[in-house]
Amino acid sequence: MAAIILAAICMVSGCARAIPKDWYEGILENYKMGFSTGWKSNPSNINISEEMQNGTYSYGYLLKDLDGDGADELLIGIDDGAEETKFTDVYIYHSDVGPFQALNDGDGYYMYICDGSTLRVDSWYGSETKTEYMKYNSKNNAFLMVDGGSKPGHYTLTPFN
């Protein structure tokens, strides 16, 4: 009887939909191929900024559990020598559609990790900068706005080569 109750609780709470351990491997392969060919074979499902295509900086990725659910999110970042790591894209495993590009730069903003899990998003509209803070919540498949965060941190990126 206890097993039936536990199974019912898992089904209602969503733990029956486990996130595959290496769900991000296909996405990483697309980036590796793109960087190795100078984006001549740009996969249609990846929006690549001009900055990434021109090879000025080093790019890599970070796997980090932003919401504490036990599954890593995939963040694509820039190693440009700055004190804080800039991220251009965030991929999540969406419970309804699987691997999903949740946030991307579109040549208009950068993301930074503050407090170990809060994302600071800086976007530019001409000379004006807008800063917002958000936290990822896998239960809602959403990035929820929060009031703020600490200073952005520096993270070591795994290179694509």
Image: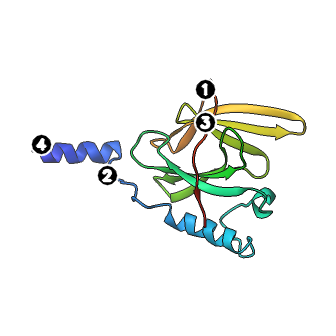
- N-terminal-most mark, 3 or 2: 2
User: What residue is pinned by disc 1?
Assistant: 150
Q: Looking at the picture, how far across and down is residue 32, in whole percent?
A: 61, 68
Residue 2 has which mark? 4
Figure check: 53 above or below 88: below
Residue located at (78% from left, 32% from top) = 130
Give the foreground label among 1 and 3. Answer: 3
Q: Is residue 59 left or right of residue 71?
A: right
Residue located at (77% from left, 62% from top) = 55
Q: Looking at the picture, how far across and down is residue 11, in whole percent?
A: 30, 48
Q: Quadrant of the N terminus?
A: top left
Q: CA distance from mark 2 to mark 4?
A: 17 Å
- N-terminal-most mark, 1 or 2: 2
Q: CA distance from mark 1 to mark 3?
A: 9 Å
Q: CA distance from mark 4 to mark 1?
A: 44 Å
Q: Nearer the viewer, residue 55 or 1?
A: 55
User: What residue is pinned by disc 3?
Assistant: 153
Q: Nearer the viewer, residue 116 or 145?
A: 116
Give the foreground label among 3 and 2. Answer: 3
Q: Dot 2: what SS? A: loop
Q: Residues within 10 Å of mark 2 (few under 14, many from 20)?
A: few
Q: Residues within 10 Å of mark 1 (few under 14, many from 20)?
A: few
Q: CA distance from mark 3 to mark 4?
A: 45 Å
Residue 16 has which mark? 2
Residue type at mark 4: give it: Ala
Q: CA distance from mark 1 to mark 2?
A: 35 Å
- N-terminal-most mark, 4 or 1: 4
Residue type at mark 3: give it: Gly
